[in-house]
Amino acid sequence: MFDAITVQTAAENASVWTLIFTILLAFVLSTLLAYVYQKTFRGLSYSRNYVQSIVLISIIAAVVIQSVGDSMSRGIGIMAAMSIIRFRTNFKDPRDTLFMFASLAEGISCGAYAFPVAITGTVGFALATILLYYSPLGPNSYFDGMLRFNLPTTNNEDKKQLETLLDKYCRAFALVTLREIAQGQRLDYAYHIKLRKKMSYDNFMVELKTIKELQGLSLMMQEATVDL
């Protein structure tokens, strides 16, 4: 499979074409990981910068491993240089961490010229992710929009009308945040919602606007917020 290119195991003896092939392979495999991440993502929004990082970090890992080669002193020097950089990115979702580690592992394998390991590992990880996505272990129900509005603190009739509309139009909804505004005179609500089948968001918004004291109404759909 890899007879078309001569691959040296030592970085000092690697040809330019070998280095180019290594970087290109790291790019292609990490792009596959990024694509799988996008297609299996279930949430209101994902970061475009994070998706790009999945692709780029594998290239960095491949270049670093190629630079180190079999040299112990180079490895120690690179570790010292990397320790100066402080990484402050916090991953709220363990799944994001796994994809970043998968891209790193793929880049390291490419940099070490373990191309069969890189390809097999990446394809295996991608297939496992897709399998879990469609299996019972995947999320069966997820929210596809966020509804925000505010109501007077003491108006119980409007709250009952709101609850009636939520039950009528939404298959699922969950209160995300609730905070006081206007010096405690009003309450600001944020709901994750999933509409029932054959229900229209336009009709939902029209009926919500019939609530007299409801203000600050906004609906952010998943399709409109996928890129951050």
Image: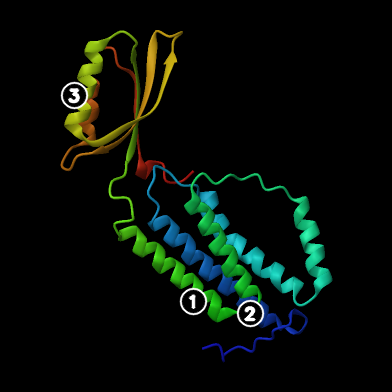
Q: Residues within 10 Å of mark 2 (few under 14, many from 20)?
A: many
Tag 1 secondary structure: helix
Q: Earlier in the sequence, mark 3 or mark 1?
A: 1
Residue at the spot 43% in from the left edge and 66% down from the top edge: 126
Indicate the position of residue 119 as horizontal and vertical percent values.
51, 76
Residue 48 vertical placement versus 59 (above, below): above
Q: Where does label 3 land, which residue?
A: 164
Residue 129 vertical placement versus 112 (above, below): above
Front residue of 2 and 184: 184
Residue at the spot 69% in from the left edge and 84% down from the top edge: 9
- Toward which corner of the image does residue 142 lie, by quadrant? top left
Q: Where does label 2 land, which residue?
A: 113
2 and 1 marks in contact (CB < 8 Å): no
Front residue of 41 and 198: 41
Q: CA distance from mark 3 to mark 1?
A: 52 Å
* Disc 1 residue type (three-letter): Thr
Tag 3 secondary structure: helix
Front residue of 227 and 45: 45
Q: Earlier in the sequence, mark 2 or mark 3?
A: 2
Q: Decide if residue 81 is in sight here.
A: yes
* Disc 2 residue type (three-letter): Tyr
Residue 70 vertical placement versus 43 (above, below): below
* Disc 3 residue type (three-letter): Thr
Q: Where does label 1 land, which residue?
A: 120
Is 155 displayed left or right of 228 in the figure?
left
Q: Decide if residue 210 is in sight here.
A: no
Is 121 displayed left or right of 196 in the figure?
right
